[in-house]
Amino acid sequence: MQHEAVDPAVMRRAWLVLVVVSLASFQTAMSLSIIFVVYADLRESFPGAGEAELSWVINSFSIVGAATLVIGGVLGERWGRRRTLLVGIWVFTLASAGAALAPSTGVLIVARALQGIGTSLSLPMGAAIVIDAFPVSRRGTGVGAWSANGAVAAAMGPSVGALLVHVGDWRWAFWLNVPFGVIALVCIARVIEEHRSPRSPEWPDRLGALMLLAGVGAMVFALVQSREWSWADPGVLVALIGGPLVLGLLVRRSRNHRMPVIDPGLFRYRSFRLGNYGMLVFSIAFFGHQLVGVNYLTTVWGLPIFEAGLLLTPVFVFTGLLSALSGRWADRWGPAGFVVAGSLMWTGGMVWQWVTLGGREDLTGWVLSVTLAGVGSGLVWGSLFAVMVADLPSGLLASGSSVAQTMMRVGNAFGVAIAVTIIGATLAAGRIGNLGTSYIMLAAGGVVTAGLGMRCARASDPGGAI
């Protein structure tokens, strides 16, 4: 089918907007993957900090981002998209500088939380600005190019982070965001025009956002502290019981709120419900593997961070490449089969690493296993998004996308927390410690996602309960 003719000047303007907005999304996407590579160097810079404490450097970004993403989207429609995007970049850039200068893990954790807030302001606004810049007949091209930019940035994260640590230290990974941020601010101020909704949207449930932050944060706290404090510790028990209780109250509150942080009504659509369950489970496995992998390579094999970063890169490269393609394939042949196939490929990669665990280096086996896992994860991500939007009315697509991003960030936090809880301080040069148990968790995530994919094949009608 041929596209209708579009004014070349309109398309030139659209591509210019895409390039400018991509400057902002590039730095945030790279930060998502780069942090796992510099994690090993953090341990050396802060020898007095335990694994549980260091894990909050990763998780503060994910948890705060999950709780503020929906609010960031609404704020942009009230303030103006251009202004909110600029504020988000300012916050992210200044927080990156604060992280680079951090004298302690506490300051670094706060800086990472502020980065999460900055991303919640800039990410939804960047997507909205790009979508509006392209004519309706070319929006698929614009969104695809914008998504590919994020995939390329995430794929570059491990190798760039490894190089920066090799020539300097982990602080360079945060300093890198500063020039990107300054260039993005200047270009956006010059190129992007302001846009506000004609009607000021209603504020989402801000108390609900705090409840999401508290509930997820408490559960992650219980997981990461259980090894150091024991499961019987009063603080761990309070967090372990209180976290699910707060989330349960949030579900109840959301059913009666006009603008909930996570709209329970969306989960009436069976495909959306199953897709988000898959997003949560697979995110736990995917992001958990990034922490497990870098610990395995740097501690058990004793590889330099530079080499470890290069060896983690194939996961993100093939994830980004196949994510872009699998969405198109899902539209043509249906997404459920790709979810199942990709999940089983991921499981195969994890099992491969599991059965070959040991102190001896097997670089060929490692590269083949992470390539298999990367291809699998790329098929899963793109297809899961296709599953989630399959039955949603057009008016619910924006809120559905926000819920999916929230689920991914929550899964990120849980994946890191579970990996830290299992591994703890059991690794040493040539000794795998509890890595075997962690790989069981990573492989199980793929198996569960495949099971959900099989159910997605029968998820064409809305219905059922949450």
Image: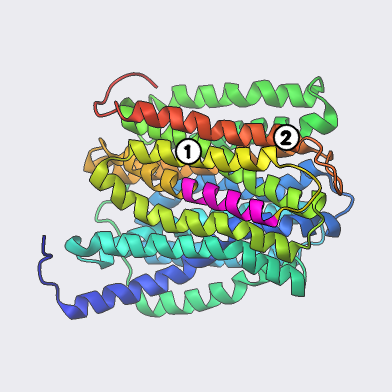
Residue 63, magenta (yes or no) = no
Q: Pinpoint residue 343: horizontal percent, then vertical percent.
A: 47, 38
* 43 lies left or right of 34: right
Q: Mark 1 points at which residue?
A: 343
Q: Which amino acid does label 1 sit on?
A: Ser
Q: How far apart, in angstroms, are the residues tagged by discs 1 and 2?
A: 19 Å
Q: Pinpoint residue 225: horizontal percent, then vertical percent.
A: 77, 33
Compared with 153, 283 (above or below) is above
Give neighbour class at mark 1: few <14, some 14-19, many 20+ (Cα, 10 Å): many
Q: Name the residue under label 2.
A: 436
Q: Pinpoint residue 188: horizontal percent, then vertical percent.
A: 42, 74
Q: Nearer the viewer, residue 388 or 81?
A: 388
Q: Quadrant of residue 410?
A: top right
Q: Can residue 412 be seen in this view?
A: no
Location of the C terminus by quadrant is top left
> Along the polypeptide, which appears first: circle 1 or circle 2?
1
Give neighbour class at mark 2: few <14, some 14-19, many 20+ (Cα, 10 Å): some
Residue interval drawn in magenta: 363-376
Q: Pinpoint residue 208: horizontal percent, then vertical percent.
A: 49, 34
